[in-house]
Image (cartoon, helix red, strand yellow):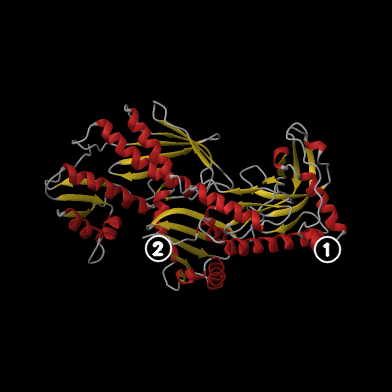
C-alpha cells in the first residue's frame, strides 16, 4: 500500500492521477502548450498604472492583463529594474550570477505603485496564480526558483528553513549548511524534503538552480520583443515528482513512450534508486480504466458524494464561496445514540472533505455544515481530525474551530481554476429531456441501499431493475449478483422489470412486498 501516480497522455493534454492506497486523491490536467503555468517568469511591459488599486496591469498578450500589486513588487524591485537595464547593455557572466551587482535601496512598505513603475516600462514578473474565470494571471516580482531541496530567491540575502521541520536541532543544522553554500545576492529557502540531507546533496540542487537562473538571465539580455517567457516552470508532472517523490511511492505508470522516457530521466535525476518504479503501460484497456480511475471520477465529482451507510455530502458552489452539507441520511444504528452517530458520520465526512478539496482543487472560502454535536469534546475531536486529514494538502489553508452550530470555515489557496468534470449523461430512456446520473453512480446507490435492506430484512431479497441494468448485474460467473450473495450470505434475486425507467430500482422481500428504507 502507498502512493501511485498514473499518467494518461493525449495530443491535447496530459492527465495525471494520484492514488493513495488505491483511492483517488488528486486529479490534474496539463494542457499541451498552456500559455501560463504557476512559476513561469516573463519579461513584459507595464500596460496601465492603477493608483486607486495601488497596482499595475502587465501586458502578457493574454485575454486579460496580468495583475501586479504594490505589495507583490518585493522590497528590492528597484534593484530588479536596474538589473534588467544592465543586462541589456552588459552581457557578461558575472552579471548573470549577480556577483558584482550593487543593490538599490529597498522600497517603502507603504509606498505607492506610481513611485516605482511607469507605463510602458519593462518588468520581470512571475505567475503565482493562473487565469481564473474573468481574472487574468496574478503576478509577483519577488522571483523564486524551486528545486528538490532548496528554493533560490534572487535579489535577497536571507535564509529560511521550512516550518514543517519540527526538530530545532535539524533546523539549525540546515540553516548553517544553507548559509555556507549561499551565493552572494541570493537568498535560500530550505524545503521540508531537505530534512536529513547532507551538504553535497543541497549543493548539487543549488548548482542546478543557479544554472537555470543563468539561462534566464541570458534570455532577458537577448529579449527583443516583449512580452517573452524567460523561464518555464517544470511541467506539473515533473514538479509533482520533485515535490512528492519519496519512499511511499509504489509506482509511476505512463501510457506514452516519449513521456515515459522523460519521466524516467527526471526520476533518475531526483533519486536514481527509484527508477524501477517508473513503468510503461502497454495494455489494451485505457490506463485510467485499468486503474479504476474513471469509475472513481464518475462517483466523486457530482453534487452528491456518498459516504456509505446512507450518509452523504452535498457540495454546492456560490459566487462567493463553496458550501458543503453533511447528511446522515436515514440510516442510524439502533445500538448508538444520536450524538455517537453524529460523531461517526462527521469523522467520515471530514476524511472525504479533505479528499474532495484536493481532488476538485477547491479554493477560496469553504463553509462546512457538519451534523450538530452537543458535546464540546466531540467538536474538538472533529476539528483535530479534520486538521490531521488536511495535513497532506500542499495548498496553503487555514481551518477555524467549529461553531456551536457545527459550522467549520476553511480558507484554501487557489492558484489555478477549479477542476470540474461532468458526471451526468443524457437520459437514455427518453422519458425526460434532461440528464441523469451516470450508470456507474446507480450501481453505487444500489450497493448502499442494499446494505440497508439487508440490515432491515431477513431471508431472500429481490432487486427490481431495468432489463439493461439487470443484464449488467448478472453477467458472468462471478457477477455483481453472486459477489453480493457471497458477501451477505443471503439469497439475492435480480429481477428485470420492463416497466421501470433506465435508472429506476426497487427492493422487495421474498413475498414480493416492496421494502421501504427507514
- Please tell me the numbered disc located at residue 92: 1
* Mark 1 residue element: loop
For residue 24, say whether it is visible.
yes
Q: Which residue is mark 2?
A: 291
Residue 14 percent across, percent down from the top left:
55, 62
- The one of 129 and 500 positioned closer to us in this rendering: 129
Q: Quadrant of residue 314?
A: top left
Residue 363 percent across, percent down from the top left:
53, 42
Residue occupying image coordinates x 70% and y 41%: 72
- The one of 28 and 278 positioned closer to us in this rendering: 278
* Mark 2 residue element: loop
Q: Quadrant of residue 149?
A: bottom right
- The one of 442 and 502 positioned closer to us in this rendering: 442
Residue occupying image coordinates x 20% and y 60%: 482
- Please tell me the numbered disc located at residue 305: none
Q: Quadrant of the C terminus?
A: top left
- Left/right of residue 5 with respect to residue 502 in the rendered view: right
* Spatial separation of the CA atoms under disc 1 and disc 2: 52 Å
- The one of 431 and 427 positioned closer to us in this rendering: 427
- Left/right of residue 27 with respect to residue 462 in the rendered view: right
Outermost residue to the right: 89
Q: Are marks 1 and 2 in contact (CB under 8 Å)?
A: no
Residue occupying image coordinates x 42% and y 72%: 284
Residue occupying image coordinates x 79% and y 38%: 49
Residue 15 percent across, percent down from the top left:
52, 60
How many C-alpha atoms fall within 10 Å of the one at disc 1: few (<14), some, or many (≥20)?
few
Q: Quadrant of the N terminus?
A: bottom left
Q: Earlier in the sequence, mark 1 or mark 2?
A: 1
Vertical side of 394 occupied by 339: above or below? above
- Left/right of residue 118 with respect to residue 464 in the rendered view: right
Residue 118 percent across, percent down from the top left:
83, 41
Amino acid at each position: 500500500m502507498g502512493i501511485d501516480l498514473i499518467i494518461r497522455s493525449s495530443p491535447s493534454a496530459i492527465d495525471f492521477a494520484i492514488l493513495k492506497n488505491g483511492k483517488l486523491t488528486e486529479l490534474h490536467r496539463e494542457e499541451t502548450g498552456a500559455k501560463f503555468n504557476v512559476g513561469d517568469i516573463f519579461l513584459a511591459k507595464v500596460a496601465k498604472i492603477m493608483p486607486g488599486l495601488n497596482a499595475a496591469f502587465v501586458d502578457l498578450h493574454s485575454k486579460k492583463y496580468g495583475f501586479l500589486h504594490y505589495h507583490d513588487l518585493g522590497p528590492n524591485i528597484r534593484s530588479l529594474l536596474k538589473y534588467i537595464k544592465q543586462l541589456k547593455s552588459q552581457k557578461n557572466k558575472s552579471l548573470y550570477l549577480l556577483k558584482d551587482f550593487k543593490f538599490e535601496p529597498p522600497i517603502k512598505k507603504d509606498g505607492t505603485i506610481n513611485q516605482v513603475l511607469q507605463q510602458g516600462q519593462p518588468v520581470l514578473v512571475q505567475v503565482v496564480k493562473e487565469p481564473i474565470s474573468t481574472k487574468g494571471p496574478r503576478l509577483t516580482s519577488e522571483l523564486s526558483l524551486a528545486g528538490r531541496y532548496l528554493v533560490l530567491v534572487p535579489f535577497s540575502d536571507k535564509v529560511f528553513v521550512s516550518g514543517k521541520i519540527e526538530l530545532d536541532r535539524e533546523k539549525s543544522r540546515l540553516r548553517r549548511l544553507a548559509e555556507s553554500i549561499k551565493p552572494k545576492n541570493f537568498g535560500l529557502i530550505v524545503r521540508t524534503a531537505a530534512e536529513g540531507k547532507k551538504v553535497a546533496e543541497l549543493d548539487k540542487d543549488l548548482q542546478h538552480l543557479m544554472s537555470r537562473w543563468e539561462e534566464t538571465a541570458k534570455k532577458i539580455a537577448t529579449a527583443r520583443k516583449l512580452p517573452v517567457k524567460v523561464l518555464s516552470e517544470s511541467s506539473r508532472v515533473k514538479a509533482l515528482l520533485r515535490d512528492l517523490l519519496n519512499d511511499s511511492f509504489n509506482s509511476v505508470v505512463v501510457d506514452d513512450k516519449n513521456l515515459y522516457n522523460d519521466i524516467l530521466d527526471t526520476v533518475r535525476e531526483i533519486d536514481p534508486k527509484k527508477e524501477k518504479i517508473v513503468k510503461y503501460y502497454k495494455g489494451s484497456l485505457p490506463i485510467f480504466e485499468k486503474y479504476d480511475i474513471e469509475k472513481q471520477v464518475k462517483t466523486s465529482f457530482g453534487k452528491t458524494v456518498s459516504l456509505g451507510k446512507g450518509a452523504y455530502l452535498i457540495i454546492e458552489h456560490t459566487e462567493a464561496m463553496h458550501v458543503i452539507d453533511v447528511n446522515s441520511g436515514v440510516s442510524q444504528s439502533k445500538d448508538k445514540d444520536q450524538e455517537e452517530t453524529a460523531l461517526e458520520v462527521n469523522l467520515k465526512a471530514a476524511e472525504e472533505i479533505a479528499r474532495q478539496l484536493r481532488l476538485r482543487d477547491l479554493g477560496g472560502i469553504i463553509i462546512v455544515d457538519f451534523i450538530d454535536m452537543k458535546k464540546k469534546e466531540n467538536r474538538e475531536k472533529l476539528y483535530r481530525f479534520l486538521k490531521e486529514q488536511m495535513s497532506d494538502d500542499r495548498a496553503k489553508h487555514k481551518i477555524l474551530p467549529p461553531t456551536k452550530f457545527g459550522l467549520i470555515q476553511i480558507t484554501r489557496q487557489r492558484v489555478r481554476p477549479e477542476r470540474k468534470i461532468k458526471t451526468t449523461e443524457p437520459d437514455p430512456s427518453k422519458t425526460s429531456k434532461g440528464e441523469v446520473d451516470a450508470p456507474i453512480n446507480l450501481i453505487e446507490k444500489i450497493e448502499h441501499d442494499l446494505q440497508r435492506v439487508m440490515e432491515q430484512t431477513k431471508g431472500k431479497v429481490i432487486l427490481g431493475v431495468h432489463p439493461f441494468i439487470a443484464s449488467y448485474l448478472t453477467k458472468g460467473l462471478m457477477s455483481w449478483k453472486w459477489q453480493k450473495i457471497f458477501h451477505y450470505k443471503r439469497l439475492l434475486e435480480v429481477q428485470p422489470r420492463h416497466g421501470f425507467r433506465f435508472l429506476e430500482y426497487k427492493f422487495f422481500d421474498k413475498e414480493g412486498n416492496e421494502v421501504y428504507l427507514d
